[in-house]
Image (cartoon, grey):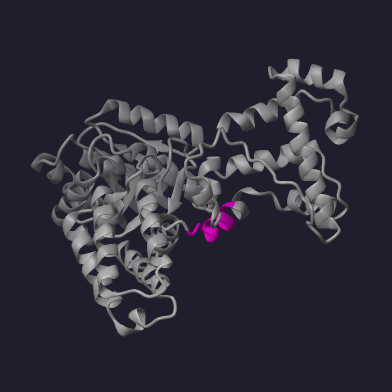
Amino acid sequence: MFSNLSDRLDGIFKTLRGHGKLSEDNIKDALKQVRRALLEADVNYKVAKSFLDDVREESMGEKVLQSVTPGQQIIKIIYDKMVDLLGGQHRPVRFAKSPEPTIWMLVGLQGSGKTTTCGKLAKHFAKAGRKPHMIAADLARPAAIEQLKTLGKQLNIPVYSGTGSPHDVAKAGVAAATEAGADLIILDTAGRLHIDDTLMGEVAAIKETVVPTETFFVADSLTGQDAVASASAFAERVGVDGVIFTKIDGDSRGGAALSVVKASGVPILFVGTGEKLDGLEPFHPDRMVSRILGLGDVVSLVEKAQEHFDASQAEKLEKKLRKAEFDFEDFYEQMQQLKKMGPLESVLGMIPGLGKQMKGMKVDENAQKRMEAMILSMTLEERRRPEIINGSRRLRIAKGSGNSIQDVNRLIKQFGAMQKMIKQMSKGGMKGFPKMQLPFG
């Protein structure tokens, strides 16, 4: 996500920080490079020009040119302006006043990920205590109805489907969901391969009938500036309240996300990652810019940890760590908790500084699976007392997990280093601690 732009900006920032004093020529040259980086990232050229004009105006002031750290000052200006470009502040989704149910209507082109996003929203807010129902009003694509029903069964969330016009199905679905006690109704609508009057008329008629609390435009970030143009068209002709970007983890450029707010006047409310139903994040402009500029995203990391880590297990583990008691059972439990937070590469990228160190390295997700297999091939006694794992036991673990004896030796060596670190921490020191290895391929 935004990896190409991050790489380019990181190089430009290193040059800026290397100058003890900056001149107007230095700044102009750096901003030319920033402009090139933005255009290569598929940022709309008008948006890029406006952004750079704002940055240039502040960068040429005496405060920057006479600063002790002029490079850092310009980076701060770029950070602030990029946050503004993405909408400034996080805009929470709106809910209707009780007892009226909240209605969210999803619109967009065919293939943008509307149906999957319905499921993601339903799961996300069901965990938050809402009672969601979904309505399958995409009658142009029968597979969409079946897909939504499948998602509903998977999530144990009711799905309404009916016959007639999309307008009739939407109206009847809202009535049925309200009668059933739903406080959140998520409405899936039809898309087309491109914008046409039929699509706009159908969506506008549904919106006029159900009067949604929020209308979300769902955009595939991989389509680049086409997504921006479509968002602008829907915002103008139908009226939308926010954008949800799907597949953003597969977009190394990110220009669409950086362009859509300025071009359409519509904020980004969520970003979707992957096909899994828990791959949905509320959008925070400041956090996203921190990731783009390689500054990490500690706040989101902590929120993910709070959401997925079991408090009682954490307390139990803390007590064991204080006594320097950490075994393979604890290690395996922590691996399972970490998996719930999402792809390891994404989680590590939220740690300040680590994202830059990871450049050029590929996180081997299969390494974790191999480690799990080796731990599960141990007996309960071996997991709790790793020191008893001798040569014959290592051979049995290797065969039982489908790995080599070298893999088992490597795991035990790394685990031993981790135990040593924990003992040092429990004694209040880290001196002489050996370097740890992460499961990079």
What is the x, y in percent for residue 255?
28, 50
In this rendering, would 194 be left or right of 14? Answer: left
Q: Is residue 165 above or below residue 264?
A: above
Nearer to me, 304 or 53: 53
What is the x, y in percent for residue 253?
32, 46
Q: Does residue 126 appear in the picture of this structure?
A: yes
How many discs mark residues in the rendered view? 0
Q: Residue furthest right?
A: 388
Residue 78: name its quadrant. bottom left
Looking at the rendering, the stretch of residues picked out in magenta corresponds to 295-304
Q: Is residue 188 above or below residue 80?
A: above
- Indicate yes or no whether the magenta region holds residue 302: yes
Q: What residue lies at 24% left-to-right and 54% top-to-bottom?
A: 36
**Where, quadrant-wise, is the C terminus in this rendering?**
top right
- Indicate yes or no whether the magenta region holds residue 57: no
Q: What residue lies at 78% left-to-right and 21% top-to-bottom?
A: 397
Q: What residue lies at 82% left-to-right and 44% top-to-bottom?
A: 326
What is the x, y in percent for residue 207?
22, 51
What is the x, y in percent for residue 309?
66, 49
Nearer to me, 233 or 172: 233
In this rendering, would 60 be left or right of 372? Answer: left
Q: What residue lies at 46% left-to-right and 56% top-to-bottom?
A: 294
Residue 54: name its quadrant. bottom left
Magenta stretch mostly in which secondary structure? Answer: helix
Nearer to me, 133 or 194: 194
Q: Residue furthest top?
A: 399
Q: Is residue 282 above or below residue 189?
A: below
Nearer to me, 390 or 341: 390
Q: Does residue 180 appear in the picture of this structure?
A: no
